[in-house]
Amino acid sequence: MKLHPVDYGNFTFENNLLMYKLEMPFYYVPFVKKVAIKHLDGRNIIVSIENSNISSQSYIKVPNEGFNGNALYVRVLPYVPRYFSREQLEKLKEIYDLDKGQYDFTVVE
């Protein structure tokens, strides 16, 4: 996989929420197959995004509070909330059947 500057989105952590600001080119690649979040050193995380058109990794800075290591799940599609809590994500998993469908959302510790 190629390593490159972040150009698929902007992730930050605030008050234990994973915040995701949707950016292009996700509007052109709606069928994201896998997103993995890997804890590196408390100040950086690596995000892997894979689908039929894209296979890439991006390093993303985390604010000074750092990453608490808890499991976090993201759905990188245009029509989901940009700011959500773990409870809201569980609800999204129920609504969209994320555990059974075409999408694979994993966290790599």
Image: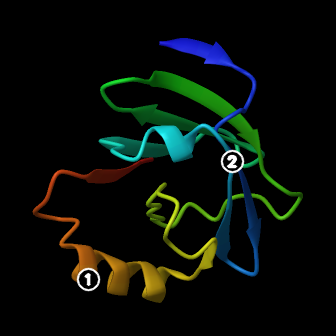
Q: Which residue is mark 2?
A: 23
Residue 40 % position (x, y): 62, 38
Task: Write the residue at 72% across / 49% down.
Answer: 42
Quarter holding residue 41:
top right
Q: Is residue 23 above or below residue 6?
A: below
97 relative position to 34: left or right: left
Residue 86 % position (x, y): 48, 80
Label 2 crowd bin: few (<14), some (14–19), many (20+), radius 10 Å: few
Label annotation for residue 95 = 1
Task: Write the residue at 10% across / 63% down.
Answer: 100
Q: Nearer the viewer, residue 68 or 90?
A: 90
Indicate the amino acid at tag 1.
Answer: Ile
Query: In terms of secondary structure, where does tag 1 sit?
Result: helix
Indicate the amino acid at tag 2.
Answer: Glu
Quarter holding residue 69:
bottom right
Task: Write the residue at 50% across / 72% down.
Answer: 80
Calculate the distance from the C-alpha at mark 1 to the C-alpha at mark 2: 24 Å
Q: Is residue 15 above or below residue 77?
A: below
